[in-house]
Structures are given as C-alpha cells and as structure tokens.
Amino acid sequence: MVRLITHNMLACHVKNCTKDNFPLSFSDVELVVRPAPENLEFIQRFLPKLDWSALVDTARSLGDESLPEQMPDQWTEEQLKALHHVLMELHVEEGNMTCRGCGHVYPISNGIPNMLLAEHEVGR
Amino acid sequence: MPQYILRISLDHTSFRIPSLLSVSQVFNFAIRFISKDKYRGLLVIELEKEEDVHHILARDTLVLSACELYASGDTYEELHEQMKGNLKVLEPYLHSSFKFTLEGANHRVLDKRVTETVESFAYTELKGKIQMKDPEEEFVIFEDYDWEVAHTVEARIKRDGKFRHVYFGRRVGFGKARLLPTVHDVKARAYYGNTSMDSHMGFLMAGQALPAPGKIIYDPFVGTGSMLYASAHWGAYVMGSDIDGRQIRGKAKGKEVKPGILRAAAQYGTEDLFLDCLTYDVTKSPIRRGGWVDAIITDPPYGVRAGAKRLGRKEGGRPLRDEPYMFPDGTYSHLMPGYLPPSRPYELANLTKDLVQLARWLLVPGGRLVFFLPTVTEDYQEVDVPVVEGMRELKVGEGSVQDFGKWGRRLITMEKTAQDDGPPPTFEDHEEFDIRNQPDHLPGHHGFRDRYATGFSSRKKSENASPAGTPPVLEPVVSLGSGDKV
C-alpha cells in the first residue's frame, strides 16, 4: 500500500508547516507493482481531485515516466490506463516520505505510513 | 405496478426499511411500501419491474425470499375470491411444471392442513406437471401469524390457522445476501480484535453508505477494519486510518508480514480494493483537501472497549512541549524507534460533532456519513445528533436502534447537502459540551465511557458524586451492575 492516489491527498501537517508541505517526497523506497482491476470511469471521475504536477513529479521520482507533463484535455484509453497503473498499481511498501518544507520524515513499514506527529509538532 | 411479498427476517427490524431503501438508492429504482405494519415477517412492496426485486434479493441481508403477489386476504375466502378475479396472471405459467408451498411466518403450519389448503387452489387449473423437485415455477401460500410464545405441541395445534393475513404468489427467488454475514463471520475472520463489529451489523451499516464500484469509502477510526470488509464486498474502494497503527497491523511483526486488515481482506477476495490504511490522528490529519470521499462509515470508539484518544496532553497536566526533547546523549526522543506521542481522551460528544464536520468537508456533494452513536437511553433526545450546516440526517421513523436496555446505539445516516467543500474542521473542543459552562442539555452520549463504567446511574446523582470538571479516574470495567462491588 501507500498508493499514489492516497499519496496525492496527503500533505505534511506539522504545526506552522505551510510552505512546500506537499507533495511529500519518497526516499529509500521499496516499490511493489500489484495489478489491480481497471475502473477507468473512476479514474476519469477522480481527475479533478488530483494535483497533477505533484503526481507527475512523484511518479517520476519512483521511475515511472509514463505521465505527460501537462494534464491532457482529451484522454486516450492508453493514457487512462497509464494513469490507472500509476495511481492504483504502484505500492510503496517500505521507505520514507519526507516533507520538503520542515523535513519531517514519515516512515512507511509494511505499507502503512506512520503519520503521527511528535509532541512538539502537534500545536494546540 | 407489480407487488411483491418479501419474507423478511425479524432481526434488526428498525434497520429493515433503511436497508431496503439503500438498495433502491444504489440501483436507482422506486420502492413503495404497501403493508400497513412494516415490521411483520412478511412485507408487501411495489416495484416497477421484476429486475428490481432481484437487486433486493442479491443485496439485502435481511430478505429471505420474494414472491410476486397475486392475491391476499384476512381469510382464505377473501383470498380465493380475489384470486378468481385475477386468474390471467397465471397464463404464462399454465403449462409449466410447478409445485405449491405453504409457509407460515411466526408459525409452522401443521402438515395435515397442507394438502387440503393446496387443493383449494384447484380452480387455478394449472395444467403443467406437478414436480416437487426443481419445478419451473413455485407458487407460495403465506400465512402471517402474530408473534406469540408457543412452546408446546398443543399450543402450536391450537394456534394453527389463526393467522392474521394470508397471501398467494409466485416465487421470484431467494435472498442471496442472507449468507453473507456468515461468510464474513468475525470468528472465522483471518484478523479481528475486541472491537470488531458483528458481521451482520457491518453489512447493514455498509448498506447505508451506498457502496458500489468506483466509490471511495473511508473509516477514520478503522481499528481492525470491520466496517470496510462489507463495503469492499460491494465493490467500493475503501481506506482507513487510526491513531493506533497496531490495530491495523496486528501482533505479527517483521518485514514480510502482511497487515492484519489486508489478511482479512484477502480472505474475502477484496484486497485490491483496500486503497490504503494509515496511522494518524484524524484530528491532526494530513489530508490535504476535501470533497473527494463518497462515504464515511465508522464505529467511533465509545471509550469502553477501546479508549478514544487524540494527540495532546490532558488538561491540567504538563503542557505540550514546543521544542523537541533531547536526551543527555544528544538524541531526540521523538526520533527513537517506537516513539509514541502523548495522547489525551477524546470525549464522545466532541468526537461526534467533529465527525459530522469532517464529513461536511471531506465528502462529495450527496455523499454519506454513517456511524453508530452509543447513547444512554434515559438521556437521549433527538437534538443529540449534531446539527451541522450542509449535512442532513436521513431517518426512517424513530431511526435504527440496537437496544441494550440502559443504553443503545443508534445508526445515524447523514447526507451532505452542501455543494462546496467549505473549510476543514478545526477539531477544537466544543464549548457547548464543556460541563464548566453548565450547558442546559448534555447529549445522551456525552461522557459515555464514564456513564458506562458507573452502570448508567442517573446524571443528576453522578454529578453530585463527582464535581464537574474532574471526572473520576477509571479502572477497567469489571461489573455493569450499579453499585456492585467486586
């Protein structure tokens, strides 16, 4: 788990961290590809919720170059399939997600990220 | 429009109508309830087409079987009279092989009466072969009895034939979802914990969230994941978060160990629908935007079996650190493996209101929030369900309640009526629930953990016993009887 669809919805939430807190950058990643049944209609409906440039950058950092720099206006089925692969089939099982703003490291183990804040990061 | 008789379970009766409605909402068909009393073992409904009844049979865990209704009456005379004027409905089946079945709701009809009753339908002049095994059509006579205790054979004989209503129809099919709660039985699940929800209730709850392929359903207090298995069974993508990651993982440790929730999901063949499970406190959550979740479904921690926690420190204690703590050897405490930040109790009335506000932000327009609200029966009032602009409660009659006597839990279903996302909730403690402000009314679920531990003693008394603002220190619950000493 930690699929890119979820990763695209997560930002650093340490108190007062508001700059460069999204997207979190991956490091020391153990990547697993697990084929998932396609639901391209869902992918298309989800498009407006995505932050495209964050997704493209993240996918590239994981070695997947299949997404175009700009979000296409008209989608071909092939492009949607590539997006499905990036969003749903890439699983980061081990590694870290690091905030580029404050440097907080969110470790991932067994596919579950620990996103609890430390005491001094909570804020009131 | 055709009418159908549903033979329907007498369990969870207050969930029955919402459950049927949710099926009609998922598949977008109209359903009309014909029976005056909607809570008997037989329920007559009206649908546009037979396809709709198959959706109900495939999906509703409470429905045992469905028949197309041809005639009914309070007596057999009335039934036959109506049927004789309606014989054309049988034309398509005149030459099909068939059998007759006599079923009783709340009563098993005596064998000796079966033959004469079936023979009284001779006027239907069905010409097909009578075939008891695998006939093409099955015609069913339903006798609907009041619920009554009849322990002895004599009582059963005395009662036989004294039904309230009798129906006649053709069997359309049997409930296919009936077995799902057994298939998902917690005892046979690959992974569960002491807070896992009974599988049937899980399905009834999930139904309210209208799960379907291509929807995202989220549980912010996911625990061992029991809310998600039923949702994923109907094809929805699911995700969960919890402040306590141990609940998601289970005890087994190691790099190759699959988290507990995924092991159970794999058992049900839905692992690929589990988008993600994350460890965080939903009140300090990393979710960056709203408006993308189709339903939130959760059984929030009542504080009884699992303590409801959020990050922070208890009021009156040491304040939160502003700077990281450094050990004498120069390492930071929060960077040590196994570091757990401090947490404080999350009072249920605050949690509930936060949950509705979270839904207001996170859901898509028309999305649903489904959760259990445990509440002290004596103190519950309708206003206890949090009112938040942009969210509307969907309720049938008195609502769906699981009654345990002094307390009960209500299944609350809400719909997001707002079209925008609005601002994210702040998760500040709500002043209206602070006993120091001496509110006129505290919800029946306020301080639920303490009420449970004190055997639900009346609020007035317990207020005298413990001054406001300093709840008693709680020991593990060992006895529920009020005043019992163990």
Image (spheres, rainbow, N blue to C red):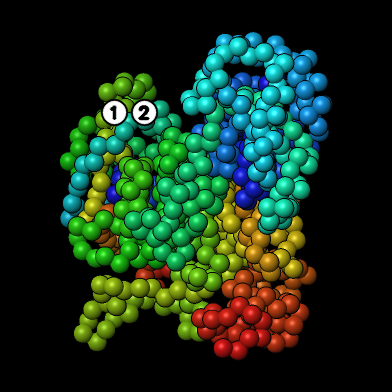
Say which quarter of the image contains residue B323: bottom left
Nearest the viewer among B261 and B465 is B261
Q: Which chain carries label 1?
A: A
Say which label, 2 or 1, has the lower sequence index.
2
Residue at point 72%, 24% (across, down): B120
Chain letter belonging to callout 2: A
| Residue drawn at x 77%, y 36% as measured from the top left | B165
Residue B148's place in the image compared with B127, above or below, is below
Q: Where is residue B218 in the image (x, y as percent from the top left)?
A: 46, 49
Q: Residue at 60% across / 85% down in the picture?
A: B472
Q: Residue furthest front?
A: B112
Badge 2 density bin: few <14, some 14–19, many ≥20, Cα 10 Å: some
Whether residue B122 is situated above or below residue B299 in the rendered picture: above
Is residue A115 found left or right of B38 in the rendered image? left
Q: How far apart are marks 2 and 1 (CA)?
A: 7 Å
Q: Position of residue B361 (x, y in %)?
A: 54, 48
* Image coords of residue B44 (percent x, y): 70, 32
Q: Mark 2 points at which residue?
A: A40
Residue at numbered disc 1: A81
User: Where does the C terminus of chain B fall, quadrant-wise?
Assistant: bottom right
